[in-house]
Image: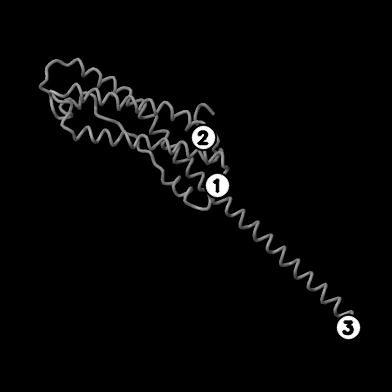
Amino acid sequence: MNKRDRKYLTIEGVVVLFGVLIALVVDHARQQWLEDREAQIALSRVYLELDHNLTQLEDLQTVGTDRLARLRELRSIEGSEHSLADLMSRFSGYRTPDLNEAAWNRLVQSRLADSIDPQLLEQAFQIYEANQLFDGLDWEINRLVYSELFHSADKRPVAIAISERIMAQQLTWVAEQIPRYAEFLCTAPDDVLIDRPSTC
């Protein structure tokens, strides 16, 4: 092989090497773009899920405030022939929010979470973590409803006091959560949410 052939072979090798490197860079950039796009779709689902959850909390705030006031009126009822269960229709019972977390769980359990802004991810994590508090209160409500206190006429004052505490705690947490939700939802892209919180 003469000097000229070696020169052409070297040039051809360099061209092939550059071609492979460019193909790898383009493929990596394409993969990164696809992953970022998937992450944004997953985040959009979280925004929609939190928008639904915010509606649930606002409903609980409105309905819960009214029901708590009606429950407190039951303290003034004379006589002990009725249990709280008997008087349930007077305050319409307990309201619990239907807070979803499926979209959030899918996002954080996938590799896509690495493509989301860490500050946004932390903010969402705190919101969803606080939602677990409502599950604890739901458990307390169920425990009360199936207890002797709820069905015994002579224990009605105790059942009312416990119910008041649970419902007041719900409303306290709702009041704390609603601004967090609104702040997070204000970061949603314009094409994700139809109605943005009024505080945005």
**Residue hosting label 1:** 40
The colour scheme is one colour
Question: In this image, 13 relative to 111: left or right?
Answer: right
Q: In this view, does 41 lie above or below 182?
A: below
**Number of residues whose C-alpha sits closer than 10 Å to that of mark 3, classed few (under 14), some (14–19) or many (20 or more):** few
Alpha carbons under labels 3 and 2: distance apart: 70 Å
Question: What is the three-letter code of the residue carrying label 1?
Answer: Gln
How far apart, in angstroms, are the residues tagged by discs 3 and 1?
A: 57 Å
Nearer mark to the viewer, of 3 and 2: 3
Label 1 sits on a secondary structure element that is: helix
Amino acid at the residue labelled 3? Asn
Q: Mark 2 sits on what residue? A: 184
Q: In the rendering, at what x and y percent does residue 133 appear?
A: 37, 35
The label number, if any, that marks residue 51 in the structure image: none
- Three-letter code, disc 2: Phe
Instruction: Tell me which label, 2 or 1, sits earlier in the chain.
Output: 1
Q: What element carries label 3?
A: loop
Picture quadrant of residue 171: top left
Q: Where is residue 129, by image quadrant?
A: top left
Q: Label 2 to label 1, Cα distance in Å?
A: 15 Å
Which numbered disc flags the more N-terminal residue, 3 or 1?
A: 3
Q: Where is the N terminus found, in terms of image quarters?
A: bottom right
Q: Residue 2 carries which label?
A: 3
* Residue at point 61%, 53% (across, down): 33
Residue occupying the point 72% across, 63% down: 22
**Which percent across, then down, holds residue 173?**
39, 28
Q: Where is residue 115 in the image (x, y as percent from the top left)?
A: 57, 48
